[in-house]
Image (spheres, rainbow, N blue to C red):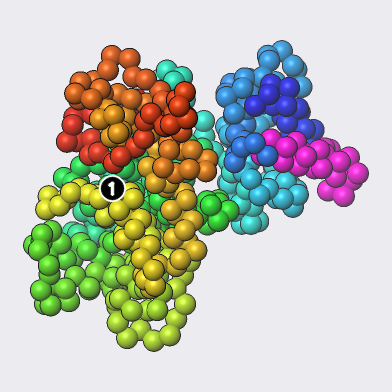
Amino acid sequence: MDPRKAEDLVRRLATAVRGADLYSPTHPLVQRGLDGLLTATREALQTAASVVVGFIDDEIVVDGVRLPRGTAALVGFARDVRDREIEKVTFTRGLTRDEIRQFITVLGDRQSQVPLADQLTARGVRHIELGKVIVEDVTDDQAGIAAAKRVYATAVETAETLWQAAKAGDQPDPGAARKIIDGLARLVSQDRTSLMALTALKKYDNYTFTHMVNVSALAMAQARTLNIDGPLLREFGFAALMHDIGKVNTPLEVLNKPDKLSREEFEIMKRHVVDGAHILRRTPEMPALAPIVAFEHHLKQDLSGYPEKIGSRKLNLCTMIVSIADVFDALRSTRPYRQGLATDRIRNIMGEQGSPAFNQPLLKRFVNLMGLFPVGNLVRLNTEELAVVTAEHPTDPFRPQVKIVADATGACLEEPMLANTWDRDARGEHPRAVIEAVDPESVGIDPLKYM
């Protein structure tokens, strides 16, 4: 963000808060302060999905831009905000004037003992979030992917804990699950590229837990394209994380059987949707959406699939989103008994004409979201070079930007080379083109090193 605009945004925020402290809600100065803050935030949100204002000691940072020191009014404002235990305020696209008004009203109420974040949620504020500042001890160029790695690794570890608790007959801890979702939701909103790259890179030895995390991340990424944010976004992520929890009761020989299941084995497999709904319904503080998605996620648009004979119903939006994420991640995952499929092959399978499995408008949105060759994927070029996809072309999914990391013999380059596969040579031809996706494990390359 431009430093002048960043400072203007914070000044307008400080003015609005100060006005609410001094005057009644209907006072013209308060109304003027609200309008000024709304104008500044909306202008900032025209070029970014979110704007983060952080308060560190006596300093204020706006989207990485540190405001100049020495302005007494802003120093006092920073201290006042921190006294209210606010370290970070995130404004996201879709912000309304009423949400600004509710936010300022909550800040002005110094008598309430209810946490500020909970007050905002209770008032229906979805596009303003309060949080803690997380300072990453990494270099600037690695901050994004390094932070994403830590969030993702913690999420997978916690998913395993939730799974083992349910398998032992205990109730999975909703508090632990919420911590996962909070971290993933921040990445979806602020660094989706790093998160999507991480979901594409996993080994089959912990498939169950990475699948839980990946489906949650992919579902929230889809939900954001529908302008779903705030508590509802996290509820979608929560339901997606727990969608397969009923499989804790499915025998491993059925879960991991490489061949086609027998009729009896398939009947056993189908029970996991009902088992999952029961586990989640019995768990205190579990969002109401979670058991619904667990029950519905293998139902198709025409209500075929399973469970069977459930009568007439309309599938929940979250269910339809999770179903897409679930199948996509399962098809691209390498398992002990089969290789994962390339994205273009998965797209063809999932997009079969007349298929009742998925909501077609949602599926098209998902395909556009992921792209043909998603960022972070390792690919082979027509030159036999290996490259990591670093950016998608805005209109041509076949021609991404890549970073070439290995030559035609497979030898890793000391200096990886950035290349746009859409560039043409002197003859007007494309010298490089992506041929196929490559399993990074098979060639011993970690694509995340090159992002």
Name the residue rendered at 73%, 27% in the picture.
Answer: 5
Depth check: give the residue in front, 387 or 197: 387
166 to the left or right of 366: left
The residue under the point 64% across, 36% down is 47
Residue 14, given in percent of the width and then of the height, sits at 75, 31
Q: Residue extending furthest front?
A: 427
Residue at screen point 43% across, 36% down:
400
Residue appearing at x 10%, y 74% in the figure? 262
- Toward the viewer: 220 or 56? 220
Residue 420 in picture, x, y percent from top left:
44, 29
Q: What secondary structure prevails in the magenta region?
A: helix
Q: Residue 62 lies in what quarter of the image?
A: top right
Taking the magenta stretch, the answer to whether it contains residue 24 is: yes
Note whether 139 is above or below 14 in the view shown: above
Q: Amino acid at mark 1?
A: Ala
Magenta span of residues: 19-45
